[in-house]
Image: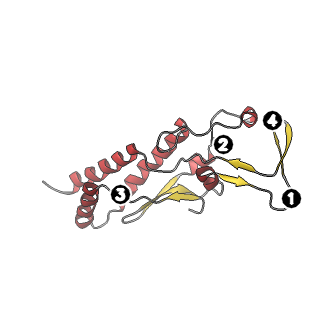
Amino acid sequence: MSGVSISVTIQDRAVQDAFRTLAFRMGNTQPVMAAIGTELVASTHMRFVTQTDPEGNAWQALNTAYAATKRNTRILTESGGLRDSINSQAGQDVVHVGTSKIYARVHQEGAAIVPKNASALVFFIGGDLVKAKSVTLPARRYLGISAEDETSIAEIVFGFVERYLPR
């Protein structure tokens, strides 16, 4: 994923111990990681609906002149391409969640856009010609692990433990 992805280490000791036990019993824990990835992709998709970051904070509102020209009122969802590109790739003891969209990092982390070969950026917004030395796009974090995600990850791991470890 050349766009943007996240890396998280589970700190919960009980979940770590359960995962180690699963790794010993199952041998191949990729199905566990794939299930976690599927859950995290679904959670990330919901952030585009709620327009909030992983901590539940609302994304910064759009520039009003720009918002007036959009086809819809959703932030980061002009076409749905960014949202729909979120995917997961599961390995033996890792899952990557992210997107390969080239513009993804700018929206996740924010950025100052400056002209490369001119003295100003020139663009139309709301029907008006705008010239600016720079434009700042705020970070609108959609990738990340929420408290609900942590609970879901634990439930997935413990669910696999129940299925694969006889009592």
Q: Which residue is mark 1?
A: 118
Q: Going from the N terminus, do you reach mark 2 or mark 4 first?
A: 2
Q: Where residue 141 appears, x then y in whole percent?
A: 55, 47
Q: Where residue 8 appears, x then y in whole percent?
A: 42, 58
Asked if the residue under mark 3 is in contact with the one under mark 4, i.e. CB atoms within 8 Å, the reply is: no
Q: Going from the N terminus, do you reach mark 2 or mark 3 first?
A: 3
| Kind of residue indicated by mark 1 | Ala
**129 sits to left or right of 70:** right
Tell us which disc is closer to us: 3 or 1.
1
Above or below, 22 relative to 70: below
- For the residue carrying disc 1, how many other residues have a C-alpha within 10 Å: few (<14), some (14-19), or many (20+)? few
Q: Which residue is mark 3?
A: 10
Q: Which residue is mark 4?
A: 126
Q: What is the secondary structure assignment of the residue under circle 1? A: loop
Tell us which disc is closer to us: 2 or 4.
4
Depth check: give the residue in front, 160 or 154.
154
Q: Quadrant of the N terminus?
A: bottom right
Q: Which residue is mark 2?
A: 79
At 62% from the left and 36% from the top, the residue drawn is: 74
